[in-house]
Amino acid sequence: MGRVGRRILALVIDWAIAVGLACLIWGYTLLDYDGFVVLGVFVLLQAVLLATLGASIGHLLLGLRLISLSGGPVGVWRPVVRSVLLGLAVPALVWDSDQRGFHDKIAGTVLIRR
């Protein structure tokens, strides 16, 4: 399983990319942007990249990937559910003894090292 430090760093990288894209597309500055727009970009990027590549850019850079607990492909609904819950933040802050976030438990996924 991907350890907490890698997962948090991947999250920071993905958030920075979302901020950069929001600034580029909507003309914000790095010091003055709409947090809800950035959150929307972040959730959209997470859902699309996890459904298509099985990893976000931050995950890829840090050698992580998302898999289904059943062993099959993650499909589309799991990444969407996981991304929306991650955007809500609270499920991601609640972990179990395996250090899986509540968003992963609900989606039936696990983030592992490649």
Image: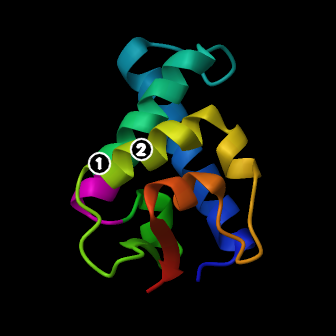
Question: What's the residue at 45%, 36% (across, down)?
Answer: 43
Q: Amino acid at mark 2?
A: Val
> What's the CA distance linking mark 2 and mark 1?
6 Å
In the structure shown, which secondary structural element does the residue marked by tag 2 occupy? helix
Q: Which residue is mark 1?
A: 77
Camera-side residue of 79 and 9: 79
Question: Is the C-beta separation of discs 2 and 1 under 8 Å?
Answer: yes
Q: Residues within 10 Å of mark 2 (few under 14, many from 20)?
A: some
Question: Considering depth in this image, is 24 or 88 the residue closer to the camera?
Answer: 88
The quadrant of the image that shows the C terminus is bottom left
84 shown above or below 77 = above
The kind of secondary structure the magenta stretch mainly shows is helix
**Residue of label 2:** 81
Indicate yes or no whether the magenta region holds residue 10. no
- Residue 90: image location, x then y, percent: 71, 39
Residue 7 lies, with reference to residue 90, above or below; the image says below
Q: Which residues are magenta?
A: 49-54
Task: Tell me what residue is drawn at x 45 percent, y 63 percent.
Answer: 108
Location of residue 69 with respect to 22 vertically, above or below? below
* Residue 56 percent across, percent down from the top left: 41, 58
What element does badge 1 sit on? helix
Give the quadrant of the N terminus: bottom right
Using the rendered view, name the quadrant where residue 47 is placed. Answer: top left
Residue 87 position, x and y percent, is: 56, 35
Query: What residue type is disc 1 on?
Result: Trp
